Image: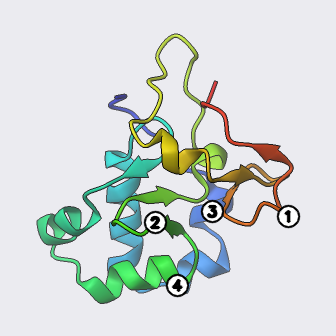
């Protein structure tokens, strides 16, 4: 997994993001730093505890659709492909491929769980 991540000002300076509580904004940044090369994470609650965020801060990210959730706690950063571009020779495909394959990609590059909104099927980030 990479040790460097990028964040798009299109996301972090949007009204939707800035309307979130500061703790939720900080949690989003930490989740982005800890996510795998395709934007998936399975330890969001651990990150909450590490930085002193609450379940409410995590819920705010989920409700605002900055994080997409799956039934067993795995989450995906919705705007991962807008934020990050990882070189093909450095990319490691997610261990959560069965979840990734349930996602589509909208025209703007954001992940979606709604296949009708999807322009593309999920594929590893390259």
Q: Do the residues labelled 3 and 2 touch (CB within 8 Å)?
A: no
* CA separation in Å, label 3 and label 4: 16 Å
Q: Can residue 90 be seen from the camera position used here?
A: yes
Badge 2 or badge 4: first in the primary sequence: 4
Residues under labels 1 and 2: Cα distance? 19 Å
On screen, residue 40 versus residue 30, left or right, reads right
Is residue 65 placed above or below 90 in the rendered structure? below
- Viewer-side residue, 102 vs 30: 102
Residue 84 or residue 121, whichever sits in front? 121
How much space separates mark 2 and mark 4, taking CA atoms?
14 Å
- Residue at label 2? 70
Nearer the viewer's eye, disc 3 or disc 2?
Answer: 2
Q: Which mark is residue 116?
A: 1
On the image, numbered disc 3 is attached to which residue? Answer: 11
- Closest to the camera, between mark 3 and mark 4, is 4
Q: Name the residue at 44% across, 35% down.
A: 94
For mark 2, give the secondary structure: loop
Mark in the foreground, 2 or 4: 2
Callouts 2 and 4 close, C-beta under 8 Å: no
């Amino acid at each position: 997994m990479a040790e460097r991540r990028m964040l798009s000002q299109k996301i972090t300076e949007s009204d939707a993001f800035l309307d979130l509580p500061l703790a939720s904004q900080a949690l989003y940044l930490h989740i982005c730093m800890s996510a795998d090369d395709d934007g998936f994470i399975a330890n969001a609650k651990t990150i909450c505890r590490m930085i002193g965020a609450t379940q409410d801060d995590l819920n705010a990210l989920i409700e605002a659709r900055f994080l997409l959730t799956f039934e067993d706690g795995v989450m995906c950063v919705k705007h991962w492909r807008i934020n990050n571009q990882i070189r093909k020779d450095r990319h490691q495909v997610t261990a959560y491929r069965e979840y990734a394959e349930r996602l589509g990609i909208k025209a703007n590059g954001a992940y979606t769980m709604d296949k009708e909104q999807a322009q593309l099927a999920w594929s590893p980030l390259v």
